[in-house]
Image (cartoon, rainbow, N blue to C red):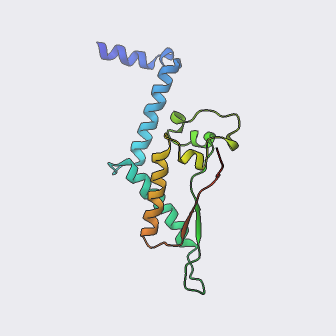
């Protein structure tokens, strides 16, 4: 019946060559990959913050040492500074990133953090830094990359 017709259409070459259908298929694959990676996490933002904090904490713990004045040696953690082409290669990045003529000078670093479309992601990074510091890794010093004037 109708279900067989739909399945036959999905198997046809025309279906898979249509750009709209290709994008739908790619979107489904992206969402499936995100679900697979975040199994057990109802809140995907919490997954991101926890995993990023764990990575930051691992690095900070790896360089931990107490200086002669009793303070911990600093671990400078540069916040994200991917170029648009690098973001585009992340899971789901193709959805958000366009192409730039010169990604080295484009939408990156601090100019990205304050942009309306990225601000929430920046806040997640800050939450991850805070979480790792709350675990006792006070040697973590965040660095804001690629600062420039408008």
Q: Is 46 displayed left or right of 137 in the figure?
A: left
* Foreground residue among 19 and 120: 120
Q: Is residue 3 above or below residue 56?
A: above
In the rendered image, which quarter is residue 4 located in?
A: top left
Q: In which quadrant is the N terminus drawn?
A: top left
Question: Residue 83: x and y, percent?
Answer: 63, 44
Give the number of marks. 0
* Foreground residue among 15 and 60: 60
Q: Is 14 displayed left or right of 7 in the figure?
A: right
Q: Is 140 displayed left or right of 134 in the figure?
A: right
* Foreground residue among 150 and 60: 150
User: Residue drawn 43% across and 55% down?
Assistant: 49
Q: Which residue is outermost to the front?
A: 150
Q: Is 6 displayed left or right of 114 in the figure?
A: left
Q: Which residue is outermost to the bottom?
A: 68
Question: Residue 79: x and y, percent?
Answer: 56, 56
User: Residue drawn 59% across and 76% down?
Assistant: 73
Q: In which quadrant is the C terminus drawn?
A: top right
Question: Residue 135: x and y, percent?
Answer: 42, 70
User: Residue drawn 42% across and 48% down?
Assistant: 37
Q: Is residue 144 above or below residue 114?
A: below
Question: Residue 111: x and y, percent?
Answer: 59, 46
């Amino acid at each position: 019946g109708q279900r067989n017709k739909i399945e036959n259409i999905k198997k046809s070459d025309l279906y898979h060559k249509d750009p709209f259908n290709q994008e739908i298929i790619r979107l489904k694959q992206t969402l499936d990959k995100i679900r697979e990676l975040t199994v057990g996490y109802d809140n995907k933002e919490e997954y991101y913050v926890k995993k990023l904090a764990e990575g930051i904490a691992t690095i900070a713990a790896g360089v931990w040492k107490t200086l002669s004045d009793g303070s911990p040696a600093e671990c400078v953690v540069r916040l994200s500074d991917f170029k648009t082409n690098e973001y585009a290669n992340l899971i789901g990045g193709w959805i958000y990133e366009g192409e730039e003529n010169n990604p080295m000078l484009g939408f990156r670093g601090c100019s990205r953090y304050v942009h309306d479309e990225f601000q929430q992601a920046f806040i997640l990074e800050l939450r991850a830094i805070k979480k790792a510091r709350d675990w006792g890794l006070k040697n973590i010093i965040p660095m804001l990359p690629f600062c420039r004037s408008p």
